[in-house]
Amino acid sequence: MLYAVVDIETTGSFAAANGITEIAIVIHDGEKVLNFYESLVNPHVPIPYFIERLTGIDNNMVANAPSFEEIAGQVYELLQDKIFVAHNVNFDYSFVKYHLDAAGYEIDEKKLCTVRLARKVIPGLNGYSLGKLTQQLGIHHGARHRAGGDALATADLLAMIVARDTNGAIAAALKGNTAESYIPPHLPVEQIAQLPGTPGVYYFYNAEGKVIYVGKAINLRKRVKSHFSNNKVNRQKQDFLRETARISYKQCATELMAHILESTEIRRLWPIHNRSQRGYLPQFGLFSYEDRNGFMRLAIEKNRQAAKPLYTFNTAVEGQMRLRELISEFNLCNRLCNISPDCECSMHADADEYNARVEEAMEWMRKLLPTFAYIDKGIEENEHSCILIMEGNFVGMGYLSDKKQQMETLEILKSHLEPLQDNDFIRNLVYKHATANPDKCVEFAGAHVLSAVESVK
């Protein structure tokens, strides 16, 4: 078995918009070096200053170097029929494959990551970066952060791993290459293997323990694996692979509960790699306040943290339509509802009488908003899951071991649920499921159950 141990220096962190400035390839048989290739490369884009400082490679050094296209044929021949090896292999492989593809050469070689192999074969070390490994294992590491020096050090590390691999870690890695080779090098495979095949929410952490991504799943193990099923060369994918160091999860009884938990956790943690739902917050609300003349006013305004709206809307137009409906139904004043600046009506001659109509309108709106519990299967066989909506607002969710007793009143039910933050996205999800599955809904009138608890499966 022959290995091609590769190291590259680049102008940036992802292949789709960055070039290679230097490449080194060590052909190795697992015991010794058979061939060594090294070349500077002209990326035809400026090298950022911080990369110049890290690698020592500047624009003058690569000005007369060949482009990658000029050396692509030689690189391709060196890699053919070899195991592609690198320290954090996904990074080097993504760049080399991308630029070979651009030059008209296609590779599809098996890969080995010396970070992951070192963790398995030489456990218990204080860090697995190339610098820390060479220092701890006594491997010569000259010309650090240059392709040649790093590739030769990685080749020596590979020889040490091969010599110590008594449990077949290399063979196992090659056998499961299509799945495991894309997993981030610092993420233990065992954490993925231990994930259950049930609904839930999963969390990706960086090396500092900060959550960088939250996702939901019908099948936790399958969904998490899908994140690492390819080696895309865009910035988001490569940053994600590089940063992920740990996974945790919370199991849920149903996909709906997982969807709700994901939404609340994204808004609680705001992970850097979550793009969805960032803009899914109601922009406008129906607010009430008393003016200096003692009249209750209604207005559609942008949502603000300092006050809670009576109702929320995604657009101002939607809010204005609902407010005009209240004006017509309860004979409210256009001016006092901020619909028009002028009004000659006599609807507001007496503040107390007018305010009573406003209160009646608000009470009517509150009655339109439902209070119900959405009951479904639990995680365990002898329990039920419960999602609670009160006056149109999402309150929380949890699990009930004695459905009849724990749902006797709203207050008792609430005490058994985990309170979670309300938002339009969650409400719409619950309403959608409630409409599709009315048999799973238990309605409340005031504080007491209106529909039969026993009938809900």
Image: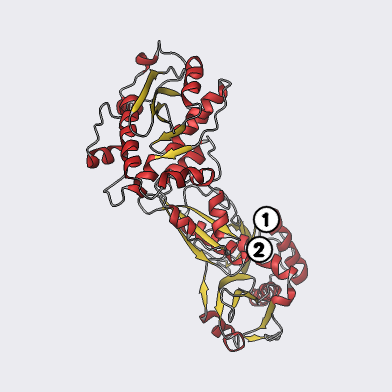
Relative to 369, is 408 above or below? below
Query: Is residue 116 visible in this depiction of the protein?
Result: yes
Seen in the picture, residue 228 relative to 408 is either above or below; the reply is: above
Name the quadrant containing residue 158: top left
Q: Nearer the viewer, residue 420 or 159?
A: 159
| Residue name at image x 74 percent, y 71 percent | 330
Q: Amino acid at mark 2?
A: Leu
Locate residue 20: give its quadrant.
top left
Of labels 2 and 1, the one closer to you: 2
Circle 2 is placed at which residue position? 429
Looking at the figure, which quarter contains the N terminus? top left
Q: Going by the picture, which residue comes out furthest to the top?
A: 64
Quadrant in which the C terminus is drawn? bottom right
| Residue 161 image offset from top left, x and y in percent | 34, 41
**Residue 231: x, y in percent?**
53, 39
- Check disc 2: other Cα within 10 Å, few if <14, some if 14-19, many if 20+: some
Q: Nearer the viewer, residue 163 or 250?
A: 163
Q: Mark 1 Cα within 10 Å, few/some/many (few <14, many 20+)?
A: few
Q: Give percent across and percent down for residue 120.
A: 36, 49
Q: Position of residue 242 (x, y in %)?
A: 43, 42
Q: How far apart are labels 2 and 1 at the CA level?
A: 38 Å
Q: Nearer the viewer, residue 84 or 279?
A: 84
The residue pinned by badge 1 equals 341
Residue 441 has which mark? Answer: none
Residue at the image point whose x is 36% and y is 22% from the top:
36
Q: Which amino acid is tagged 1? A: Pro
Q: Give the mark nearer the N terminus: 2 vs 1.
A: 1
> Please, what secondary structure does the residue beneath circle 2 have?
helix
Q: Nearer the viewer, residue 164 or 332?
A: 164
The answer to whether 269 appears left or right of 34 in the picture is: right
Q: Residue at image x 36%, y 24%?
A: 34
Residue 395 placement, left or right of 133: right
